[in-house]
Amino acid sequence: MQVSVLLTTYNGADFCARRWTACWRSASPISRSWWWMTPPPTPPPTCWRPAPIHAFACCAARGNWAWRRPAISVFPTVAASISRPRTTDDLSRPERLAVQAAYLDAHPEVVLAGSEVLISEHGRLRPTDHRPGSTPALMRWMLHLDNPITWSSVMFRAEAARRLDRFMRQEYEPADDFDLFHRLLAVGGIARLDETLAVYRWHRANTSHGQKDRMLGRAATLLADAYRPWLGEDAPAAAVLVVRHLVDRQPAPDAATLARLGGVLERLQTGFCAATAPDPATAAQIEAHTARVWWLATRAAVRSGSPTALRRWRDAAALGAGFRPGARDIAGSLRRRHGARAAAAGTERIGANVGQGRCPWTPIKAES
């Protein structure tokens, strides 16, 4: 199986040529699993891993267009069976290509595979709030509540992307990765590997941070289209509510807003399960994920200064049946005295990194 890496750079043609020549000649761990073949100067050593980069393409641009436009222009020329986009904000482990290519080879029904990531912020690495054990069936549901896939971690089948009308739709920038994921769901499954294979570097120059409002607006438009078969004319308002409180992670300002969010979650889960007919194991995973999301939204509201929100959570017993927070977690939320200030600081720190694997809530343990 051959892999093409889409790497964009600005005024970097000379650097790329020098860098990749050095990697080719190097005996480092990176060069043992990543190699450039357009064409190779000598046959690759037999000790190198079986997930070679088939092509490394450089294209001249008229200006600094970040990664999207150059990648869109290069993608039609990709000849390999698998493509891996590479942004300047990510770091990859040496074994990443081999692990993801092997997964796609073993799961032909999956068209895109992301991975778990670490987030680098202010010189420190932190984990995401993702839980292990997701499946493509569960990921389909998760993509209707948030973007659980970090773009910097994905690898996808080139043929699956070619079956779409377009690769990346510029009218959905900067949420065009979220748009791509939803369109690929019509072609096959999407997975997220539990292995940590990439590091996402978070900083204020990130597109997702600098264009927060625009990105959230595009995400709401996408989700409204996805919700319309289940919610009808209520879909746009429901999408705005989900984007504000589940994607952007803003705490609900009062119990009434939280109740509306809970009602939307119930209707979405009912419509999704009716449309996809999940097996019992998948249905249980979907219920557990929805319940956990519902509790985290409740906890954020409580800690931001709305303790009566906890009553709404207790009233929606069916919605929370799949996940039970620990007693200490509930009590700790009620004891928190500076919740509003902490929530505001957390929102500013995290921004609206759709798909960038942020950790907006303190990780919780059900057994605590």
Image (tube, rainbow, N blue to C red):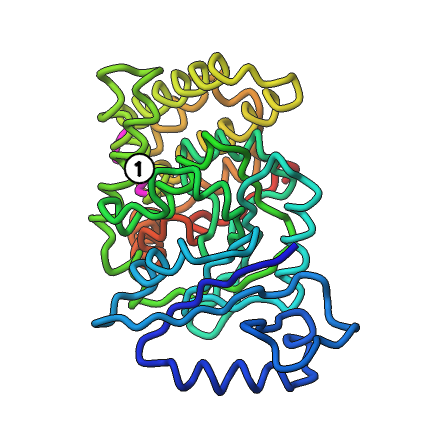
* Magenta run includes residue 183: no
Amino acid type at circle 1 is: Val
- Residue 193: x and y in percent read 62, 47
Question: Of residues 27 and 198, which is closer to you in this image?
Answer: 27
Q: Is residue 167 left or right of residue 289?
A: left
- Residue 53: x and y in percent read 58, 65
Label tally: 1
Q: Main secondary structure of the magenta part?
A: loop
- Residue 232: x and y in percent read 27, 15
Which residue corresponds to the image point at 32% horizontal and 44% vertical from the top-left?
Answer: 248
Q: Is residue 334 visible?
A: no
Looking at the rendered image, the quarter that the N terminus falls into is bottom right
Q: Quadrant of residue 356?
A: bottom left
Q: Quadrant of residue 306?
A: top left
Circle 1 residue: 243
Q: Relative to 289, does residue 115 appear above or below in the rendering?
A: below
Q: Is residue 366 visible?
A: yes
Q: Is residue 252 left or right of residue 17?
A: left
Magenta-colored span: 250-254
Which residue corresponds to the image point at 23% horizontal and 26% vertical from the top-left?
Answer: 236
